[in-house]
Image (tube, grey):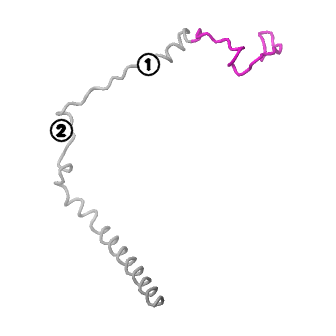
Amino acid sequence: MTNLEGNIVDVPNPSGRGPGYRYFKAAKKLPRVKKLFEKQPELRKRRTTNDIYKIIDASYYGYRDEVLAIVKGPTEVNMRTEAEKEWRRVEEIRREARRRAN
């Protein structure tokens, strides 16, 4: 650590803790630092029941399932056939293992 003239000064505890600790909360009184420690109040407006119901639309109640069926239909069929193929393959392996065990 150096002083204002640039000379090296021996500090007994450079970490800032312990017997050489010289902080007396004076820095908290500085204007810019004071702003950092002040907590800003949250300005969140509470939602009313009416506000919540404004957000809810027909899709929330499931009235647009036909749109989802158009989009998801082919994908679900493909996924189902792939899962079925995998299941049949695993079953065949199990049958082979049982035959060999007997």
63, 26: nearer the viewer: 26
62, 70: nearer the viewer: 62
Q: Residue at x 78, y 11 (%)?
A: 3
Q: Tell me which corner region of the image, top left, top right, bottom left or bottom right, holds residue 44.
A: top left
- Residue type indicated by callout 1: Lys
| Number of numbered discs visible in the structure rendering | 2
Measured as percent of width and height from the top left, residue 20 is found at 72, 14
Q: Quadrant of the C terminus?
A: bottom left
Q: Is residue 4 left or right of residue 66?
A: right
78, 37: nearer the viewer: 37
Q: Is residue 47 left or right of residue 89?
A: left
Q: Residue at x 36, y 73 (%)?
A: 83
Q: Is residue 36 left or right of residue 91?
A: right
What is the CA distance from the residue labelled 1 to the residue labelled 2?
A: 33 Å
Residue behind mark 1: 39
Magenta part of the chain: 1-27
